[in-house]
Image (spheres, rainbow, N blue to C red):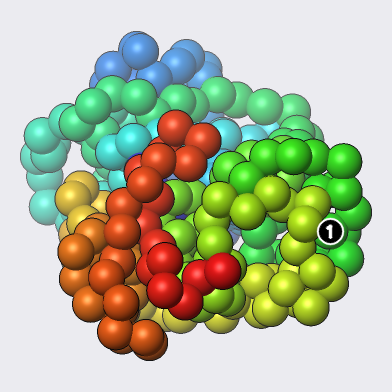
Amino acid sequence: MPELPEVETVCRQLRAAIKGKRIRAARVLDEKIGKPGDTAGRIILDVERQGKWLRIRLEGGQALEFHLRMTGRFLRLEEKGVPPHARFLFSFPGENIFLVDPRRFATLSLVEGKNRRPGADALLELDAGALRKKAESRKTAIKAFMLDQKVLAGMGNIYACEALYRSGIDPRRPCRGLSPAEWKRLSRSIRFIFKEAISMRGTSISDWRDLYGRKGDFQNRLRVYGSAGAKCRRCGGEIARIVVGGRGTYYCPGCQV
């Protein structure tokens, strides 16, 4: 699933490519995605991200709101033709931008105003003190707490594993038991990993590609995710895979305490 760095990557690319342009045509190619109505002829004012949601603001106060879910991504094409698994089309003079989605879980709707989603954005609104306060009355494991989109909008499984590893925190620990220093360390780790992943256009383990069809590069920087049985680069122990909150979780038992 595209997580915050992947959605931020395509958000920035789309903003650079289509902001200020007038939509020549906007067509739903697969009605399962949603029925946003006809937006042809309207100017795109901006492209924004909140958590894993992507919002394309239009003149007149409305916005097209996308969630890419498991395999959704945008693809820009200058030549004619429709790529496989295309579900939605933006047409501009000289180029087409498709939403491609093999598993057909991505959603689209036309919303009024900003229609802000719940949860602090895991990059733009990350605050160690606020996280600690939210965790005070909760017994849930820190990994599951991080994946709650009402807590950290945009956080996903890959980056939660990596941030906990970088912070030296066991993913099974009750979130309310973390010290103020650990919350600060975890927040710094989240911010560092997200910024690095965005600079590398995200993580391509399976389907993810950017607006121009290129893979991200952050999979080459992963330290624990997908590495069960490998040697920890920090302590030499063995990376383990467990399940926390129903999600496959990778960590080092030797140095995450």
Q: Give the mark count.
A: 1
At a point 39% along the width and 20% down the height, the residue shown is 33
Along the line of sight, which residue is nearer the eye, 207 or 37?
207
At a point 60% along the width and 25% down the height, the residue shown is 110
Say which residue label 1 marks: 132
Helix, strand or loop at mark 1: helix
Left or right of 243 in this view: 132: right
**Which of the 4 image quarters holds residue 27?**
top left
How crowded pointer 1 is (Cα within 10 Å; few <14, some 14-19, many 20+) is rated as some
**Residue 3 locus on image (x, y percent):** 45, 52
**Quarter that holds the C terminus:** bottom right
At a point 55% along the width and 75% down the height, the residue shown is 168
Left or right of 48 in this view: 35: left
**Residue 194 locus on image (x, y percent):** 52, 71
**Which of the 4 image quarters holds residue 124?**
bottom right
At a point 20% along the width and 48% down the height, the residue shown is 207
Q: Is residue 80 above or below residue 253?
A: above
**Quarter that holds the N terminus:** top left
Q: Amino acid at mark 1?
A: Arg
| Residue 43 can be seen in this image | no
Left or right of 222 in this view: 69: right
Q: Is residue 48 above or below residue 149?
A: below
